[in-house]
Image (tube, rainbow, N blue to C red):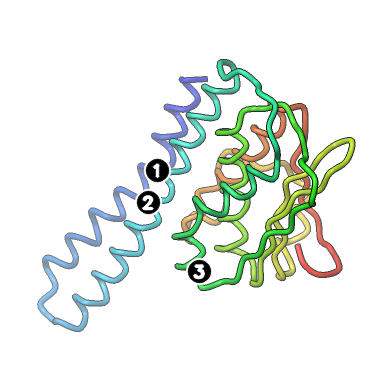
Amino acid sequence: TNRNLIGDAAHQLRNPVAALRAQAQLALDEGDPGRRSEILSRLHDRAVGLGRLLDQMLSKAMVIHRTDTAPRALLDLRDIAVEVLEDSDHDVVAANVDVTLDLPDRPVGVRGDALSLAEAGKNLLGNALRHGRGPVRLGVTAGVRPELWVLDAGAGPPPHVLTAPPARFGSRRDRGGGGLGLAIAQAVAASHGGRLVLRNEPDGF
């Protein structure tokens, strides 16, 4: 597992770091102020994307570690949803998207690892904020198999993405997705005896 994680890090970081170095060199060599400003703007965007990628890689490492070591406790899944929204406040403000909570009145008990479940939820919400369309709802559904879900008003990804399992490397690296968010959520779900479901609903994805 550690070997795979190191391989992932080397693969995912090599190109973004090289791009940052190249853009920085271009900025140093550029004499035109307007052109230099454009390069610095791209450099900033790449740095933000790289920071998000690093956050997701650390999240994945934490999830892998806790899958084997963290004890399972009785939790209220509604508390996990609230924590997800509170911890994602900065991303919500940056995306300028309305996010509402949709929670049942009664506790929704599950046995699990709160930290891992919250990480999965934050990745799902972050994915909706970056790739979906507002407004966004974050909710919990009670039942035999309780659900923590995120719904945005967009059309969702292309059909081939819905039928393919989340890969270690995604295709939206240019937008800072890193391809790890859904893979993290899938790993957390599997470690709790659940599954990640991607589907279109009448009012969104």
**Residue type at numbered disc 2:** Leu
Q: Secondary structure at mark 1?
A: helix
Q: What whole-number distance in Å separates the C-alpha atoms at marks 1 and 2?
A: 6 Å
- Residue beneath the point at 47% across and 33% down: 8
Of residues 82 and 46, the one nearer the viewer is: 82
In whole angstroms, how far apart are the C-alphas of marks 2 and 3?
Answer: 18 Å
Lower position in the chain sequence, tag 2 or tag 3 = 2
For disc 2, the marked residue is 50
Among numbered discs 3 and 1, the one appearing first in the sequence: 1
Mark whose residue sits in front, 3 or 1: 3
Q: Which residue is mark 1?
A: 54
Give the left or right position of residue 200, taking residue 14 as reference: right
Quadrant of the rendered image containing residue 135: bottom right
Q: Residues within 10 Å of mark 1 (few under 14, many from 20)?
A: some
Query: Residue 125 location in percent, x, y?
Result: 60, 55
**In-front residue for pair 66/100:** 100
- Which of discs 2 and 3 lies nearer the camera? The answer is 3
Tag 2: Cα neighbours inside 10 Å, few (<14), some, or many (≥20)? Answer: many
Q: Are marks 2 and 3 in contact (CB under 8 Å)?
A: no
The three-letter code of the residue at mark 1 reads Leu
Cα–Cα span, label 3 and label 1:
20 Å
- Say above or below: 29 vs 140: below
* Residue drawn 64% across the image and 48% down it: 81
Mark 1 vs 2: CB contact within 8 A? yes
Residue 50 picture location, percent across and down: 37, 51
Answer left or right for 56 relative to 17: right
Q: Which residue is mark 3?
A: 95
Q: Picture coordinates of residue 164 (x, y %)?
A: 74, 45
Q: In the rendered picture of this protein, how many numbered marks are placed on residues?
A: 3
- The amino acid type found where label 3 is placed reads Ala
Q: Residue 117: percent from the left, percent from the top?
A: 62, 37
| In this rendering, position of residue 47 left or right of residue 112 | left
